[in-house]
Image (spheres, helix red, strand yellow):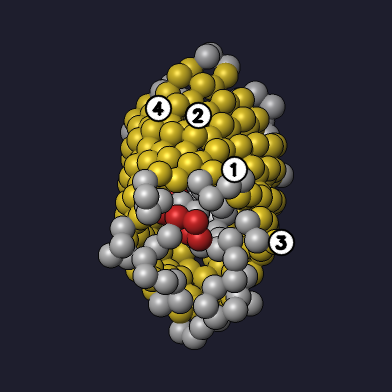
């Protein structure tokens, strides 16, 4: 593989392999797939599927209880151009514990166009009772190194009060020097209160499939509400407040089929901070 091809990595930089709800804001963009790499066909090692297991933990300040999560996820190529992704996670946030399930499909429509769609649901109050994502993506240029995407999100919180619509626009560039850069804008409309918010994000990935990847990501903007169960230390919870989240991840193959990943995350809003770490093992087959 001479460089990171958009046809095989499917917006790699948007899919940091941490638990699906580590990004707590509803305005956070959904990954194109729930896994970091979702090839549309067999790779050089003859693999077209992956299973991954991992865990994460995070410390929160200002009276909020720590997070403890575990997950198993995977993907498989059902046929050339069709990738099915799945995830099951147990998440302990804000003194509650819930189970999250998610499935999605990425489908090539032509050499230039592909679409993605996903559905997730959780059992705890801090999770969504449902979240639906649908996106369309196009490759550009004579070597198809530019990829643009537009995705729509609809979600409803398990507290039966909060509901969101989201629209994400993204642009990615896949270099011949084995790196990928991505940036995007997320627009969100939340109820109750008809609160509009927006976030920007950027990501950079360096590496090569079957060797290693380093991924850096920064996300900044507004959130409509604090998550259910979060403590604001007696202060009135603000509406449409600013927050910032940063993450770094290292993914390493130790054989053509087996590897590990480790990551660090940091988050800040006016009410509390969060720092965390994650680790996992994956197997390609």
131 vs 31, left or right, is right
Q: Going from the N terminus, do you reach mark 1 or mark 2 first?
A: 1
Residue under label 4, please give it.
198
Q: Which mark, residue 78?
A: 3
Residue furthest to the top in view is 193
The quadrant of the image that shows the N terminus is: bottom left
Pointers 1 and 3 in contact (C-beta within 8 Å)? no
Report whether residue 126 is seen: no
Q: Separation of disc 1 and disc 2 at Cα?
A: 15 Å
From this view, report whether residue 214 is shown above or below residue 282.
above
From this view, report whether residue 43 is shown above or below residue 10.
below
Residue under label 2, please give it.
167
Q: Separation of disc 3 and disc 4 at Cα?
A: 36 Å
From this view, report whether residue 130 is shown above or below residue 189.
below
Answer few, some or many: residues within 10 Å of disc 2's Cα (few below 14, many 20 plus, some between 14 and 19).
many
Q: Going from the N terminus, do you reach mark 3 or mark 2 first?
A: 3
In front of the other: label 3 or label 4? 3
Name the residue located 40 percent from the left edge and 51 percent from the top edge: 144
Residue furthest to the front in view is 142
Q: Separation of disc 4 and disc 2 at Cα?
A: 9 Å
Q: Going from the N terminus, do you reach mark 1 or mark 3 first?
A: 3
């Amino acid at each position: 593989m001479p460089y990171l091809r958009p046809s095989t990595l499917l917006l790699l930089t948007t899919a940091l392999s941490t638990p699906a709800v580590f990004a707590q804001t509803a305005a956070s963009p959904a990954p194109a797939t729930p896994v970091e790499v979702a090839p549309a066909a067999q790779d050089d090692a003859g693999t077209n599927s992956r299973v991954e297991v991992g865990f994460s933990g995070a410390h929160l300040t200002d009276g909020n209880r720590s997070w403890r999560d575990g997950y198993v996820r995977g993907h498989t190529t059902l046929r050339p151009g069709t990738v099915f992704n799945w995830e099951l996670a147990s998440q302990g946030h804000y003194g509650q514990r819930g189970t999250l399930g998610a499935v999605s499909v990425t489908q090539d429509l032509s050499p230039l166009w592909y679409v993605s769609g996903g559905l997730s649901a959780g059992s705890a109050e801090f999770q969504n009772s449902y979240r639906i994502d649908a996106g369309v993506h196009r490759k550009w240029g004579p070597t198809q190194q530019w990829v643009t995407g537009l995705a729509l999100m609809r979600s409803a919180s398990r507290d039966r009060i909060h509901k969101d619509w989201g629209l994400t626009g993204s642009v990615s560039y896949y270099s011949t020097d084995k790196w990928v850069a991505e940036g995007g804008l997320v627009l969100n409309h939340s109820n109750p209160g008809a609160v509009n918010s927006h976030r920007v994000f950027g990501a950079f990935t360096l590496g090569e499939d079957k060797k290693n990847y380093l991924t850096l990501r920064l996300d900044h903007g507004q959130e409509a509400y604090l998550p259910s169960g979060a403590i604001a230390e007696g202060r009135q919870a603000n509406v449409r407040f600013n927050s910032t989240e940063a993450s770094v991840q290292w993914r390493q193959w130790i054989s053509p089929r087996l590897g590990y990943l480790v990551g660090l995350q940091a988050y800040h809003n006016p009410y509390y901070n969060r720092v965390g770490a994650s680790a996992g093992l994956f197997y390609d087959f």
